[in-house]
Amino acid sequence: MSASGPSFTGVHELLSMIRSLIERRRFLSGTPDTEVRGDHPLPLVCLLREEGANDFLPALHRALGGHDAPQVPHAYLDAAAVDDHVLDRWANTDRQTLPLLPLLDELSAALGADRFGGRPLRFGLYGLADWLTAQRLSPEQGGHEQEIADLLRRRSGRVRESDAAALTGAFAAAPTSVGTVGSMLYLLVAAGRRLGLRRLGRRVPGLGREARWFMRRQPYMVPRHSTSFAGFAERLTEGRRGSENPEQVRKLLVHAFLEDLRRVYRRRHRHLLPKRSGWRRTAYTTVLLDNVTEENGGWELLRLINEVRNETGELDPLLVVAAAPRRPSSPEAEESAEPHPPREAHRALEHWLNTLPGRRQRLVENARYLWIGLPPQGDEDPGAGDAWRTVASFRPRAAPLPARRGVAELLLSAALVLTLLPVTANVVRSWSADCAYVRPGFVDGVSVRVAELGRKDRQCIGYSDNAVQVFGTNPRLRAAQAAIFEQNEVAARLHDQQPGRPYLGIVHFVGLTHRAASPDTDHAAAEELEGLLLRQRAQNVKSETQPLLRIIVANGGDGMRKAPEVVRDMLRPLFDADPSVLGVVGLDRTVEETERAITELGLAGIPAVGTTLTGSGLADLSPLYFQMVPDNTRQARLIARYATHLGAGKVTLHHPEDGDSYVDSLLTATRAELGAAGLATESRGWRSVGQVASLCADDTDRGDEIVYYIGRENTFFDFIRSVTKGCTSRRGLPRVIAADAVSRFVAQKESRRHSSLAGQPMAYVGMGALVTLAGSSCVEEGRPASLLGPGTPLDAFCAGYANLHRELARTLPEDETPRMPWPAERTGTTYDVAGLFVDATAALHERLGPSGPGAAPHRAAVAQQLRDSTFQGATGEVDFREDRVGNTRNLAVLEVTDIYDLASAPGCVFMLGDLFHPGQPRDTATGCPR
């Protein structure tokens, strides 16, 4: 005998054969002469030896367990000592009877130990069946289904263990500490039993899978003779098995044991999905049974395994290597051929595989046996001493890479990272720009994306009609949008209630975001939104005929630099999909991007109304473009006439040298108008506004001159500081007038609250002067100043504006509340712009009737209606019959005596254009209303 195990002739071949059986075939592996792939039948290897001790199986047991984990799952049992082991194991338990198959019970205990490096084997089916065979029911005849159900609940931990009366009572399923859901379930079961739903009370939660197998997927004990699993389980209990075939009960136990192993080794879920734990099992479960005899039940267990395999035809992953001094006493065993010598082990296995199909078909008692004869004890072969070194190869091969623990998780994580990385990057970019991350079409009424407007300047562009996306960061600006979105919900709800009522939407398209370091005009933008809100509140009320108004807020980015992209990629699809959206209003700033957006809208057949645009020639860009306020030629004429009225000796035009379309067109028009009026004119351009010379630098008296600032609001503060630098008196300084763009500066409280502006007067061009001149009574009392006369549309505007002003004072932070004691001209202008569309829709609906329930008129019809009618608004009459640009509308020079003082209300010093009606009193010299 070698140091590792017995050495005899053929030991190498025998160990090699056992090794080939232990190693599980790969899923797609097969032999060239068969189409069978994967798992193959395993024999019951029977080693016949002489009486007395033999060290082959103990040595094999040491070899299988001599490696570091993972190991081959295996168990070594001395069949002669099993009964004693089983008695010891169950001695101190409440089990009343010993297992029917002690060897099988000992195997389940040995194989279930957590010592093989993988997930421990669990014998749920066998354990349940074996446990049932040890249960005793009450002696009463019949009606034990409830009792067996209570026993099963006790075993599964669903009810605390107590006396038999409690288990069979109505509240045997009373809740223990299983949580709220479990308690409710048990109360439901108890209530159902009280109501007579007995079958509900007999259900055992958690045993559905086991019950299905016993009742539907195995043949022993004729499961169909029982109407429920509880009835079948009762037939297994002590005292009830007498009417059953004992052989069938034993086969059921063996079949359950083998099924537990099959489930552990199964490589697929539901024949399709991979089961990784089964793929990790690369070695079959090996059982080494020593000293097998008929008296200790060893041969009985092998016979049962043989017959269960023959009768069910199912493969299982159990390899049994048994050692016995003689064959069992049966005719078939005695007639079997002589056992094969160890040196012919491989040939014997091949012969067994070839003859197995026919033998199992005939249900031969020993069809699964592979007989090998061991030489007598002491028959040593010195040349076979190295055979046991091959035992090292009994270590299971590594699991396939995808089945290893952590590999699939790693691959899945990597796939998720690769998949979600772009999404995550987009989400982070969206969050950094205060932009909702929504895929196109994912959220109704919202289409936004992040735009890069410069280094570290990300802004959210697109449109929104609900709270999913609110543009900007200023509280007042966001509050105005939130209120508009609430009104959108009101309009939608009223439309559902009154589907025949006109329902229209308009897009308010301006620049609502800006660089963090940029001087902002958020309050001016909020003023425009508040005008739309006032119109919504006037419309979205109970009525039979008045149109309902929905506002879509669109953002073109800082300076409208992304306006063409927003029109092309977002607004045009919106208009194509939703015929109730009739037009675009706003169109902030006369710049190249806004002009391109107007052209895009015209090509798409979408009406557009410029709310505050004053650029010249914009109407030429689209036949559907309308302009609420006079253009730059009209503003230039206002400045020329005002200079003539004052008798100015000179007008100096200050402007940036690299101006945009607005600046260039206003500068050109102003030069022409001043020249035609015969006024002395000088143009001074700057590259940096901080380099503009002070007006008092040379002590020249310029009291009869006018300085006209033609530029944007964001440089006006620096301009005023530069031209007044070093001035200690207002005497001798010219009058400073700013172009209409500076109305944004006037509306922004933060822009004006600089100490350097204290005491500085200014004048600016107002596009909605009638609203501004409504004064403090409009804001505080809800009625316009008396100089405008009663009964104008301004009365309705002031009533709503006063309520809104008080609402903002209550809800906004103190430093964000509107402080100007006069109504904002931008609020009045957008209020009127929305009114244009509402009146046009109402007129078409009344004259032509609806084209369908709640259907809005065609956009072309709306545009034509704007051309054919006049509109009386809060800012005066709107008449596009002669021209799509409002050049006949009123335009005024408004003066503020102290820029720093927010209570310093603008006053009218000169005005051109129409008021509310031709007979309204006005000053003959200045044209201002009296």
Image (spheres, helix red, strand yellow):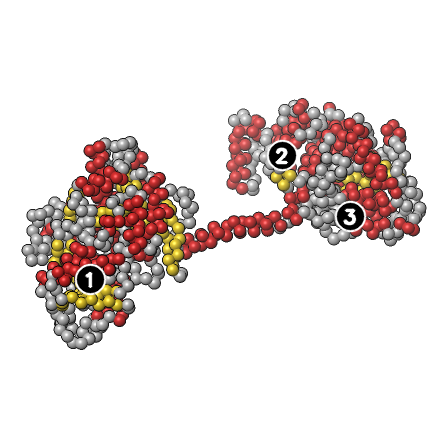
Residue 836 image point, x, y percent: 21, 43
For label 1, the SS is strand
Please rate how many residues cluster around mark 3, counting C-alpha atoms within 10 Å: few if below 14, some from 14 to 19, many from 20.
many
In the picture provided, is 76 more to the left or to the right than 373? Answer: left
For label 2, the SS is helix
In the picture provided, is 232 more to the left or to the right than 888? Answer: right
Residue 675 image point, x, y percent: 14, 62
In the picture provided, is 265 more to the left or to the right than 184? Answer: right
Where residue 912 is drawn, which disc sits there?
Answer: none
Whether residue 331 is situated above or below residue 422 in the rendered picture? above
Q: Mark 3 is on which residue type?
A: Phe
Q: Mark 2 is on which residue type?
A: Arg
Q: Mark 1 is on which residue type?
A: Ala
Mark 1 or 3, nearer chain start:
3
Of discs 1 and 3, which sits in the foreground? 1
Disc 1 from disc 3: Cα separation: 95 Å
Q: What residue is shown at x 90% (from left), y 34% (from top)?
A: 338
Q: What residue is shown at x 84% (from left), y 48% (from top)?
A: 59
Of discs 2 and 3, which sits in the foreground? 3
Where residue 738 is drawn, which disc sits there?
Answer: 1
Q: What residue is shown at x 78% (from left), y 41% (from top)?
A: 21
Disc 2 from disc 1: Cα separation: 84 Å
Q: Please identify the quarter of the rendering in which residue 540 is found.
A: top left
Q: Are marks 1 and 3 in contact (CB under 8 Å)?
A: no
Whether residue 368 is situated above or below residue 877 in the rendered picture? above
Q: Please identify the quarter of the rendering in which residue 15 is found.
A: top right
Image quarter hosting the C terminus: bottom left
Residue 360 image point, x, y percent: 78, 29
Which residue is the site of mark 2? 209
Whether residue 682 is situated above or below residue 869 in the rendered picture? below
